Structure formats: structure tokens, C-alpha cells
Image (cartoon, rainbow, N blue to C red):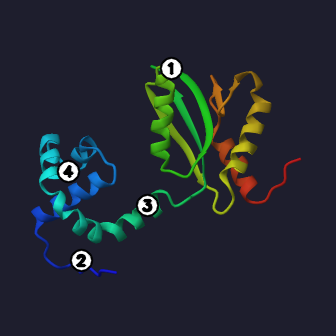
Amino acid sequence: MKKIDVFQNFDETHMKRLQLVYLNDHGFTPKEISKWTGYAISTINTYIKKFSSILDEAKKLFYHITMKVKKVLRGGKQLVYLYKFYGEEELICSKVGTTTRLPEQRLKEEIKYYRDHGIDVHRAEICSVIDCGAIPAEGAESVTRAAFIRKYPDAFYKNDRFFGVDISTRTFNKIVNDYLGGATFA
């Protein structure tokens, strides 16, 4: 394992080149890299070609950092959430669900799903995200879904969506926290 002194002086230009080739090698597009670095896409493409020879050095330098970031981002956290989606002014639906990814990433996927299916989402809210710890989040999702289906049977649509229903964040949180705290439901 290579140890790196984080206080040593790195050549800033060389470090940026290492970052570019490394990010490209890990599947990030020049457009994504451009957002983070501020470089023009044409510059990124040129650097990726011109400096591909330093990829091994970049991998050695960034490997451990990447593993730590992946662990944080994909660390298998069991999250249950409540999102709300709105049209120009009106509520479209409330949605309960689970994710092990970042809640914002999951929300973007949901917005894309709606837009791809002809639903014009203008605004979305992350109302609640609860870490279920070692308990699979699907249990908390199932309990909330069951409670809300019972209360709003005509508003329920597959994939845990309740159209036209403004689900109370407080009620959602109570159901999930009761479930996680060991409350029994009969």
C-alpha cells in the first residue's frame, strides 16, 4: 500500500491531470467532469488523450480515496423516504420508497421517470429520509404503504405512489419510527 503525505507539495497542474484521467477511467463523462472542474469539455477530451500515460499513477494515488467515497455513497445504508411531487401549483403525488443511494440521486431518478411518462413535474420535495440501520428499509416501506393504502385506497398506484394525496410527514415519521422501535402491528 502506498502511503501519501497529504501535506507534501503536489504540482497542481499535474494533480488536475491525474484527476481527469482517473475520473474518465471510472466512467464519468467529460460533461460531468466539466461541471466539477470548470474545464471546457474540449480541454478535458484533449487532456484525457494526451495524458492517458499517467493513469497508473492516478489509480495508485486515488484508489483508497475512491474506496472510502464509494463506501459512503453506496455504503448500504437502509433508507426509507417520503417525497412529494408538484405540477405548476398543485400536488401531483406523495411517494414512499427505499434507497441505499443518496436521496437526491433517487429523487432525480423519480423526476426523470415522471417526465418520461408524460407527467410534468415542476417541483419536488424530500420530506423525510430515515436511516433504518440494520433493518432492511423495505420493512418500513411496507408498513407505511399498508397504512396509507388503507387510508387512501383509491389514490394508490403501483410503485408506492399516492396521487392527489398530501401524506403527512409527521404521520410517515411516526409509522416508521414505531416500526423501527419495535412496535408491533396487528
Q: Which residue is mark 1?
A: 119
Q: CA distance from mark 1 to mark 4?
A: 33 Å
Residue 23 % position (x, y): 28, 54
Q: Position of residue 86 (x, y in %)?
A: 50, 25
Q: Residues within 10 Å of mark 2 (few under 14, many from 20)?
A: few
Which residue appears at 66% of the width and 52% of the height?
137
Looking at the rendering, in which quadrant would you find the N terminus? bottom left
Mark 2 and mark 1 in contact (Cβ < 8 Å)?
Answer: no
Q: Is residue 31 left or right of residue 14?
A: right
Tally of numbered discs:
4
Residue at point 40% right, 62% down?
69
Dot 4 surroundings within 10 Å: few (below 14), some, or many (20 or more)?
Answer: few
Q: In the image, is residue 38 above or below residue 69?
A: above
Give the crowd class for mark 3: few <14, some 14-19, many >=20 residues within 10 Å: few
Residue bearing the label numbered 2: 6
- Which structural element holds mark 1? loop
Mark identifier at residue 37: 4
Residue 173 sits above or below residue 21 on the image: above
Name the one closer to the observer, 156 or 75. Answer: 75
The residue carrying mark 3 is 70
**Distance from label 1 to label 2 (Cα)?**
49 Å
- Which mark is first along the chain, 2 or 4? 2
